[in-house]
């Protein structure tokens, strides 16, 4: 992995930033997050040991006025391509949360750092400008009935846009996600953040995935981060979110069993194959560990398994391709 | 050679299981998770059990559990030990009594348990196997769990003299629930000795590190044979829990798995649908053992096992 692809978690006290970090990166079961104590000081957590991306999660204590507190050193933050993830607790009063977000964004805007996100695949941007993508996670939605969720989302979006316009004269393209650590939504949301952070590599990854899919007659191909279970890239036609969730569960199954029978769950020979019977034809989920904590997940029909030799060969070539892309990437000066 | 029926075992064994405990101890949640495919979060929706809920659960081919889930509200419990005692407590093979570890009235819990033993079991089913589950242990900080469990266990053993009891610490949020129920179930299976013997033969034949047999719907371990030492004695219930969660995830998409192969450079595990009501799991760490050979051997063994269960 290369460069600093950092994600900064900010939000009010007890909005859920630490829960997210623990559930996604530290494999904490969601029901144990109730016992997490409030974060009282700025905690920098480099969780990237097992991840493809260099994740650095800054867990700000909610009660500090983050951007003006002189005790916290901001000089190294928000450099390079990065993402600001602002977590809002949907069950609490949103007023103060929105206010704080706007004050953070105006500081960033003054330094010309806000990425307006209008064009996802623009050419490389220089280190010091327009490099921060903004995401808002509307969190703890498991506490809201289904029919109220979309409404809340719209309401919060409008409120943020209005406040930005009114108080700081900023128009910004930011993305909101409804999330909860008790659901898969948090993984979908973080996958989206990931895709944004590597959007310079994305076309190449997607192209490689697509070619593999076509040559092996597969239904779907995905590149996932082995530890965070987010997808880094997917083939062009992938739309079935339920299948993605089953892939997450498949990775959990693999990791849990491999942890029982070996010391190091993922190595160069890591492989798994699940045959599923369903209403339609039997389907196969194949996973193969590639490199740099990346895993390839393929969904295909059982009948295609006959050509296992060709499939293995193509996966090997695919893996080499990914390796080359990453090598070129790491040789670049800075991006 | 076809074997007709195993000597000394009922072709269809009915076992009456009483599930008791005070209100909100967690009896129905447990039952739903083990037998009715609930996940832990779904149990929030369960209401209080009214009087007694009876359900019949088929387990493997020749065991039917007749589960009596007895409502825990004090009003019901009064009648259980008086007017209904006869009906409730006769011909009981297994009594499972559930205690909420965070109960506000531990003394009352113990009194009810004692009534159960004295007016129920001792009078009507002296030979019943008794299991006490100290439940909701996830709410206790890890450091205090063992001490608390041992203290409760001693009290219960004292109260139930002269009868023997077995105690378990359980929670619906981890594998301890599977440990308790696997133990309870495997002692109820009519021909478990034969199953174990055949499993050993199979494991030796194919050079496996260990072989496990699971019941298909609950994924409780019904038999296992270990040929190679392993550091984690709790791995069986962990595996039950892990695979069950994956099964539920597949069920959400209206599908079910028939075969899982997981490998890395140190081991390979194969989980296959084995008979109409069992799954088998074979673990090998010998790189010389070829994957296709293992699958072929499993296939061949299926026919043999079908005839002896």
Image: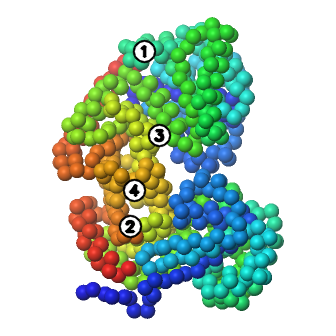
Rendered-image quadrant of the N terminus of chain B: bottom left
Q: 10 Å neighbourhood of mark 4: few (<14), some, or many (≥20)?
A: many
Q: 10 Å neighbourhood of mark 1: few (<14), some, or many (≥20)?
A: few
Please give left or right for residue A42 compared with residue B268 in the image: right
2 and 3 marks in contact (CB < 8 Å): no
1 and 3 marks in contact (CB < 8 Å): no
Indicate the position of residue B299 as horizontal and vertical percent values. 26, 68
Residue A228 marker: 3
Residue A252 marker: none
Residue A119 marker: 1
- The vertical placement of A207 against B16, above or below, is above
Mark 1: secondary structure: loop
Q: CA distance from mark 2 to mark 1?
A: 51 Å
Q: CA distance from mark 2 to mark 4?
A: 12 Å
Mark toward the viewer: 1 or 3: 1
Question: Image point 38% across, 79% down: which residue?
Answer: B309
Q: Using the rendered image, report if marks 1 and 3 lie on a common chain.
A: yes
Subunit under mark 2: B
Indicate the position of residue A117 as horizontal and vertical percent values. 48, 16
Towards the viewer: B48 or A268: B48
Visible residue check, residue A78: no
Indicate the position of residue A261 as horizontal and vertical percent values. 40, 59
Q: Using the rendered image, report if marks 2 and 1 lie on a common chain.
A: no
Q: CA distance from mark 1 to mark 3?
A: 27 Å
Q: 10 Å neighbourhood of mark 2: few (<14), some, or many (≥20)?
A: many
């Amino acid at each position: 992995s290369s460069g600093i692809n950092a994600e900064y978690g900010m939000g009010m006290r007890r909005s859920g930033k630490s829960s997210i970090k623990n559930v996604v990166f530290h494999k904490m079961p969601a029901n144990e997050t109730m016992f997490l104590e409030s974060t009282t000081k700025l905690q920098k957590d480099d969780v990237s040991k097992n991840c493809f991306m260099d994740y650095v999660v800054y867990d700000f204590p909610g009660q500090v006025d983050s951007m003006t507190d002189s005790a916290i050193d901001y000089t190294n933050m928000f450099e390079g391509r990065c993402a600001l993830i602002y977590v809002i607790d949907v069950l609490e009063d949103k007023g103060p949360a929105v206010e704080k977000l706007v004050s953070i964004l105006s500081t960033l805007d003054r330094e010309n750092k806000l990425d307006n996100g209008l064009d996802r695949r623009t050419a490389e941007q220089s280190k010091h400008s327009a490099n921060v993508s903004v995401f808002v996670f509307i969190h703890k939605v498991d506490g809201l009935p289904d029919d109220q969720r979309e409404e809340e989302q719209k309401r919060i979006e409008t409120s943020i846009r209005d406040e930005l316009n009114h108080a700081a004269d900023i128009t910004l393209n930011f993305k909101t996600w409804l999330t909860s650590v008790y659901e898969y939504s948090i993984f979908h949301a973080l996958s989206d953040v990931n895709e944004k952070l590597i959007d310079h590599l994305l076309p190449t990854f997607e192209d490689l995935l697509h070619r593999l899919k076509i040559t092996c007659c597969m239904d779907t191909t995905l590149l996932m981060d082995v530890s965070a279970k987010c997808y880094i890239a997917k083939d062009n036609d992938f739309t079935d979110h339920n299948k993605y969730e089953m892939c997450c569960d498949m990775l959990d199954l693999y990791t849990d069993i491999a942890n029982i029978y070996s010391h190091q769950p993922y190595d160069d020979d890591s492989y798994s194959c699940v045959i599923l019977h369903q209403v339609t034809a039997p389907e196969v989920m194949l996973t193969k560990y590639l490199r740099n904590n990346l895993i390839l997940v393929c969904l295909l029909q059982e009948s295609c398994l006959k050509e296992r030799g060709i499939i293995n060969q193509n996966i090997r070539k695919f893996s080499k391709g990914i390796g080359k892309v990453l090598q070129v990437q790491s040789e670049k000066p800075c991006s | 050679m076809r074997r007709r029926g195993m000597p000394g075992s009922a072709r269809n064994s009915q076992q009456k299981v009483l599930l008791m405990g005070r209100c909100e101890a967690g009896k129905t949640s447990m039952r739903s998770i083990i037998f009715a495919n609930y996940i832990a979060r779904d149990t929030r929706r369960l209401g209080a059990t009214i009087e007694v809920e009876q359900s019949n659960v088929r387990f493997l081919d020749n065991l039917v559990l007749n589960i009596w889930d007895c409502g825990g509200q004090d009003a019901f419990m009064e009648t259980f030990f008086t007017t209904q005692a006869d009906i409730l407590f006769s011909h009981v093979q297994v009594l499972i009594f559930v205690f909420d570890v965070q109960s506000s009235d531990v003394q009352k819990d113990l009194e009810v348990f004692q009534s159960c033993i004295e007016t129920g079991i001792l009078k009507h089913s002296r030979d019943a196997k008794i299991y006490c589950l100290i439940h909701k242990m996830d709410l206790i900080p890890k450091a205090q769990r063992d001490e608390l469990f041992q203290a409760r266990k001693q009290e219960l053993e004292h109260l139930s003299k002269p009868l023997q009891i077995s105690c378990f610490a359980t929670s619906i949020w981890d594998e301890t629930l599977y440990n308790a129920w696997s133990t309870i179930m495997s002692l109820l299976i009519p021909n478990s000795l034969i199953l174990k013997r055949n499993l050993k033969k199979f494991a030796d034949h194919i050079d496996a590190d260990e072989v496990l047999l699971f019941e298909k719907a609950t994924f409780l371990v019904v038999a296992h044979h270990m040929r190679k030492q392993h550091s984690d004695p709790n791995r069986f219930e962990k595996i039950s829990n892990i695979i069950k969660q994956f099964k539920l995830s597949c069920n959400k998409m209206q599908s079910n798995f028939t075969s899982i192969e997981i490998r890395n450079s140190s081991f390979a595990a194969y989980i296959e649908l084995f008979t109409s009501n069992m799954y088998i799991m074979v673990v090998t760490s010998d790189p010389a053992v070829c994957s296709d050979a293992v699958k072929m051997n499993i296939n061949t063994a299926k026919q043999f096992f079908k005839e002896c269960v």
